[in-house]
């Protein structure tokens, strides 16, 4: 990491429409994780670090922590199916978005706030479950910062 003096970790990116996070390691380095749309968990993405850091632009962009959370939960809600409280909340978001689509309108400010809040909650819930299952890339604390 010392050869990347401007990089502040954690750092969040969109890489070809996929959420990627770079996290510090105990030895002062970094590790990268990419969202798996098959499992909702994290796959190691260290092979993408140089491409992301040195080619930001086009299909690679920097995200804030909240944008990363929203993007991750958008993808989990879109690609994953299952039972339990997290999936019920994903269904709630889908119903809100589907209603707006049917009515050919954007989400109202109240609906936007509701969706954002639900996604922050599902992010923590999903990440906590990933931690319990031993996913080394899981980190529910990302959502504990300011909205």
Image: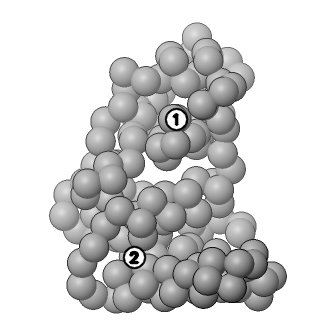
Q: Secondary structure at mark 1?
A: strand
> In the image, is 112 to the left or to the right of 118?
right
Q: What percent of the width, then of the height, locates residue 45?
A: 36, 31
In the figure, residue 31 lies in which quadrant?
A: top left
- Residue at image coords 51%, 18%: 51
In the figure, residue 53 lies in which quadrant?
A: top right
Residue 3 vertical placement versus 17 (above, below): above
Tell me the tag on residue 51. Answer: none
Q: Which residue is mark 1?
A: 15
Using the image as rendered, state which of residue 45 and residue 3 is in the foreground. Answer: 45
Residue 43 vertical placement versus 41 (above, below): above
> In the image, is 58 to the left or to the right of 38?
right
In the figure, residue 14 lies in which quadrant?
A: top right
Q: Which residue is mark 2?
A: 125
Q: Quadrant of the C terminus?
A: bottom right
Q: What percent of the width, then of the height, locates residue 70?
A: 58, 63
Q: Residue lying furthest right in this view?
A: 109
- Mark yes or no: residue 96 visible: yes
Residue 120 vertical placement versus 47 (above, below): below
Mark 1, Cα crowd under 10 Å, few <14 / some 14-19 / many 20+, is: many
Q: Secondary structure at mark 2?
A: helix
Q: What percent of the width, then of the height, locates residue 112?
A: 71, 78
């Amino acid at each position: 990491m010392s050869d990347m003096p401007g990089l502040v970790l954690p750092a969040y990116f969109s890489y070809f429409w996929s959420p990627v996070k770079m996290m510090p390691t105990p030895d002062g380095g970094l590790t990268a994780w990419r969202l798996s749309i098959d499992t909702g968990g994290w796959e190691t993405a260290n092979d993408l670090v140089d491409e992301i850091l040195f080619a930001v632009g086009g299909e690679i962009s920097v995200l804030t922590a909240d944008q990363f959370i929203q993007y991750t939960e958008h993808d989990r809600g879109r690609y994953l199916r299952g039972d339990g409280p997290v999936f019920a909340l994903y269904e709630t978001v889908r119903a809100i978005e589907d209603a707006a689509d049917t009515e050919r309108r954007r989400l109202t400010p109240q609906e936007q706030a509701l969706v954002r809040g639900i996604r922050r909650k599902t992010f923590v819930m999903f990440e906590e479950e990933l931690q319990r299952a031993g996913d080394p890339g899981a980190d529910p604390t990302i959502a504990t910062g300011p909205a």
